Image (cartoon, rainbow, N blue to C red):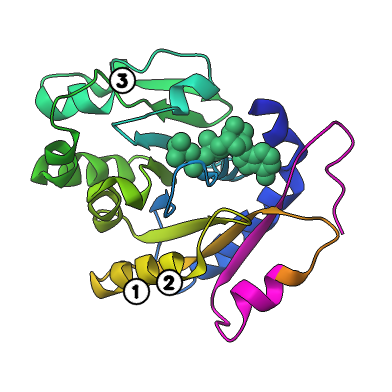
């Protein structure tokens, strides 16, 4: 995954710029990255965006809000615990033991010890307090999430965020499902910033008509489909 992200640096810089422009009216300290289905590219986008923001010199925290199938720790070759779930159930945990430096200006709060009730943890008042507290300590908090298909976790993570970034994957995400999720989020008062189109074919433009048609506000970024070495050309 790490190599892919490197090749995508330019795309993430564009995404970073688009998000910073979205922040003119209201600050966007806490961002949640989500998708309809598994494997859309949430973790890839969270890490790439986190690195792109951190490279500007601001302190960035990546939070693994996917307590069921977390993977942010794997990206950095670390253990999943201790982390968020431990902090939620044990307020005595000291934050500096949980936040791990994983790059220049980049920290990770991993998912933590597997919990029997991840849904309850993310729905808790305590979760909201922890995240809002972290928001005051970092220039940006970027939270990875479980796919919406898994249940209420995505909505609960989005509820504590200042903005939501939807990842759709060409060839994977159903347009109707994506629209349903976006409408649901908006109905809950979540500020949807836009959509990252992942796995776009470098030579294809079909996705513009399909996903951007009429929507206007939808587009946030386009990440190319990465494949064999040298296959990451952009148009
Ligand atoms: N643009 C891309 N080109 C090629 N491979 C990609 C691209 N985006 C993501 N991948 C790969 O697809 C897989 C799934 O991506 P990722 O883990 O980011 O998705 P996810 O939405 O976080 O999945 P999950 O729902 O399982 O957490 C990973 O192996 C990742 O490296
Ligand atoms: Mg993931």
Q: Secondary structure at mark 1?
A: helix
Q: Secondary structure at mark 3?
A: helix
Q: Which residue is mark 3?
A: 98
Q: Which mark is residue 179?
A: 2
Magenta residue span: 207-235
How many marks do you count on the picture?
A: 3
Q: Find out whether residue 227 is within the magenta segment.
A: yes
Say above or below: 101 vs 179.
above
Q: Find out whether residue 210 is within the magenta segment.
A: yes
Where residue 188 sits in the image (x, y, percent)?
Answer: 23, 69
Residue 54 figure quarter: top right
Q: Do labels 2 and 3 touch, CB within 8 Å?
A: no
| Dot 1 beta carbon under 8 Å from ligand 1 | no
Q: Which residue is mark 1?
A: 183
Q: Residue at x 32, y 27 (%)?
A: 111
Q: Do labels 1 and 2 touch, CB within 8 Å?
A: yes
Left or right of 28 in this view: 126: left
Where residue 140 sits in the image (x, y, percent)?
Answer: 44, 46
Q: Residue at x 86, y 60 (%)?
A: 203
As measured in the structure, the alpha-carbon distance from the residue carrying label 3 to the one carrying label 1 is 35 Å
Q: Which mark is nearer the camera, 3 or 1?
A: 1
Left or right of 74 in this view: 186: left
Residue 208 figure quarter: bottom right
As measured in the structure, the alpha-carbon distance from the residue carrying label 1 to the one carrying label 2 is 6 Å
Where residue 135 sits in the image (x, y, percent)?
Answer: 32, 46
Asked whether residue 148 appears in the rendered view, the answer is: yes
Q: Characterize the local packing of mark 2: few (<14), some (14-19) or many (20 or more) Cα atoms within 10 angstroms.
A: few
């Amino acid at each position: 995954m790490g190599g892919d992200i490197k090749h995508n640096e330019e795309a993430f810089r564009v995404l970073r710029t688009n998000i910073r422009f979205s922040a003119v009216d209201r600050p966007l300290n806490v961002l949640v990255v989500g998708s309809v289905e598994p494997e859309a590219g949430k973790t890839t986008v969270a890490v790439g965006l986190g690195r792109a923001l951190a490279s500007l010199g601001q302190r960035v925290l990546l939070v693994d809000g996917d307590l069921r199938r977390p993977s942010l720790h794997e990206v950095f070759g670390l253990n999943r615990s201790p982390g968020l779930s431990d902090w939620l159930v044990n307020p005595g945990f000291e934050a500096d033991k949980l936040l791990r430096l994983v790059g220049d200006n980049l920290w990770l709060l991993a998912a933590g010890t597997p919990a029997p009730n991840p849904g309850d943890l993310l729905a808790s008042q305590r979760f909201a307090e922890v995240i809002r507290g972290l928001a005051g300590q970092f220039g940006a908090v970027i939270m990875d999430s479980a796919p919406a298909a898994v249940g209420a976790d995505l909505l609960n993570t989005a509820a504590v965020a200042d903005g939501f970034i939807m990842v759709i994957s060409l060839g994977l995400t159903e347009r109707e499902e994506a629209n349903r999720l976006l409408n649901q989020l908006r109905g809950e008062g979540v500020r949807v910033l836009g959509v990252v189109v992942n796995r776009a074919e470098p030579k294809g433009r079909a996705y513009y008509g399909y996903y951007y048609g009429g929507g206007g506000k939808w587009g946030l970024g386009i990440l190319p489909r990465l494949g064999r070495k040298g296959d990451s050309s952009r148009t």
